[in-house]
Every structure is written in C-alpha cells, then in structure tokens.
Amino acid sequence: MSHLPEHRTGNLITRINRIEGQIGGIKKMILEEKPYDEIIIQLNSTRSAMQKISQIMLEAQADNSLMNVSEGSSLEDEMKKLQKVIKQYNKMN
C-alpha cells in the first residue's frame, strides 16, 4: 500500500467501521419508521463515505504505481493496473 497515512490499512478499516455503524443506524431508523428525509440524509452521508474510500484507493494505486516504476517495475504493467482501478472508480461515481 501507499506510504501516505490515509492510505494505510488501519485508517481504511476505521473508515469502513464507521460506515458499518452508519448502515446499522440507517437500519434502525427504518425499523423505527423515521421520516424518509432523515433516512435519505444518512444514506447520502454513507454514500459519500464510500466514495471517499474509493478515492483514497485510487490515490493509493496511483502512488503505488509511481513508486513501483521508480523502483524498476514495468511502466506498461503499472499503467494497466492504474487504468483498471480508474475504470472501477468511475463505475462508482
């Protein structure tokens, strides 16, 4: 993984744990029949958090690819990896 702090596994897991908590909260809101607008606010918040993780993963791949090329990896191979991640990132957004 990348050398940047927000790209570290522990930080990503913390973000995912928060999202799991948000999902649990949304489930509870639905069960308690909270107003739809309040539920949608929480859904949007969760979606935004997921998009942020996706962005971090894209940045980490770019960073990792650059480091690998500077250490002698094939530019073509690293570009293919990065293009694959970009394609998946675009599907989410």
Image (spheres, rainbow, N blue to C red):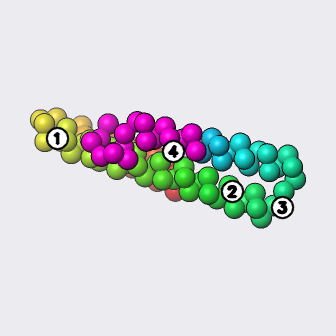
User: Residue most toward the right?
Assistant: 33
Near mark 2 (Cα within 10 A), the count class, few <14, some 14-19 or many ≥20, is: some
Spatial CA distance of label 1 from label 4 is 29 Å
Extent of the magenta region = 1-18
Amino acid type, residue under disc 3 in the picture: Pro
Cα distance in 3D space between marks 2 and 1: 41 Å
Task: State which tag comes first along the sequence, 2 or 3.
Answer: 3
The reply to whether the C-beta atoms of the residues labelled 2 and 1 are less than 8 Å apart is no
Image quadrant in which you'd find residue 82? top left
Q: Residues within 10 Å of mark 4 (few under 14, many from 20)?
A: some
Q: Nearer the viewer, mark 3 or mark 1?
A: 3
Instruction: Write down the residue under mark 2.
Output: 42
Quarter containing the N terminus: top left
Secondary structure under badge 3?
loop
Vertical position of residue 74 compared to residue 89: above or below: above
Badge 4 marks a residue whose secondary structure is helix
The numbered mark, 3 or 1, whose residue comes first in the sequence reads: 3
Mark with earlier residue (4, 3): 4
Query: Horizontal and vertical percent for residue 89?
Result: 45, 50
Q: CA distance from mark 4 to mark 2?
A: 15 Å
Residue drawn 68% across the image and 45% down it: 23
List the residue tagged with mark 3.
Answer: 35
Circle 4 sits on which residue?
A: 15
Residue matched to label 1: 69
The three-letter code of the residue at mark 1 reads Val
Up-down relation of residue 9 to residue 87 (above or below):
above
Judge whether residue 27 can be spotted in this image: yes
Drawn side of residue 48 relative to residue 82, left or right: right
C-beta proximity under 8 Å, tags 4 and 3: no
Q: Residue 75, image x and y in percent?
A: 18, 42
